Image (cartoon, rainbow, N blue to C red):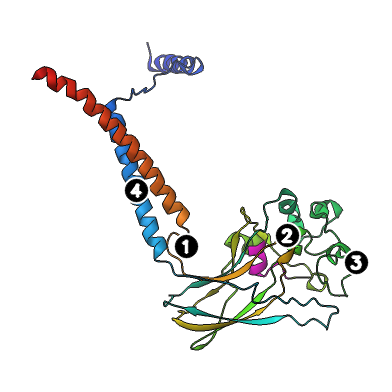
Amino acid sequence: MSDNQQQKEDKTTFLHAFKQQIMKAWQPVPTLNSTIIVFAILSTIFLVFGIVLVVFTNKIIDVKVRYDTKCSTINYPQSDSGFVPAMCTVNFNVDEDMEAPVFFYYQLTNFYQNHRRYVKSKSVVQLQGNSVSYSDVSNCEPIIYYSDLRKYLYVPSNLADNDYAWPCGLIAASLFNDTFSLTGPNGPVNISDQDIAWPSDISSKYKNRDMTKQWTNVENERFMVWMRTAALPDFRKLWGRIDQNVVAGSYTIQIANNYPVDSFDGTKSFVLSTANAFGGRNSFLGISYLVMGIICFIILMVFVFKKFKQNKPKQQKEN
């Protein structure tokens, strides 16, 4: 038989075995010893990772201040020139030095951004700066035109009611618009709005078309951060970053209090936080690893006890 004929025959045999599902396979049979080894390895991995994550999380400095109760007044504009934001001042302390970069978040509670109708209420084509037809903005319902948007927030008078709201939709219309100005022991602290959004959002997903026909700037990174909806009703979103060390001491923050939370029984807070290789302060992942490690260790002890009981009769017979 030639080499070509042998190769064809091997190939035919392989295809037949594959189609009939009779190929050779490794089918390990777990034993008591192998099970003990597997659970010993798993418990070690989970416990080590859990301890590391908890230690790293505890090193993160996190300063949170609720301010909706301290800044209760909200002013709504009546005309293009008549809007004066309700300003309030909040004093707070930073107990430890925070190394740059320090991240500045706002935190909302009881705000359900994961509602299906809310999540769908935007136009991807419009946000990319392209011209749109009604079919492109139909998902924005109930906020398609500026006449719809005016029911929810102030819109400059030069934007016609029958024009498409740019941007349209519920997500954009509920944009968080409080602003913050921070002053520390050494003077004003700059909170930058650069490098806070995802690089993919900055490069391709958000483009202005004509600012004279838009009610807000979609290329602003704070807008991009808001448009990424949160999965849970209590969430933090990045408002800016501080590229200098924040030293311990007394701080004052001036807040333009524009965003109402009473309608959904929510709260507002701002948060100053450092980060590490695993991100910001979040103990959930570390605790999850520890819980899984403890569960695997308990199962391991059960199998070790079972092995001990099996070996005991053998030792008695030998004696």
Give the labeled residue for mark 3.
161
Indicate which label's residue lies in the foreground, 3 or 1.
1
Q: Which residues are magenta?
A: 217-226
Q: Residues within 10 Å of mark 1 (few under 14, many from 20)?
A: some
Sequence-wise first label, 4 or 2: 4
Q: Is residue 128 visible?
A: no
Give the labeled residue for mark 1.
281
Sequence-wise first label, 1 or 2: 2
Position of 132 relative to 25 (above/below)? below
Element on which disc 2 rests: helix
Q: Which mark is residue 198?
A: none
Sequence-wise first label, 3 or 4: 4
Q: Which mark is residue 171?
A: 2
Q: Is residue 91 visible?
A: yes
Question: In terms of depth relative to the viewer, which is nearer, 108 or 23?
Answer: 108
Magenta stretch holds residue 80: no
Q: CA distance from mark 3 to mark 4?
A: 60 Å
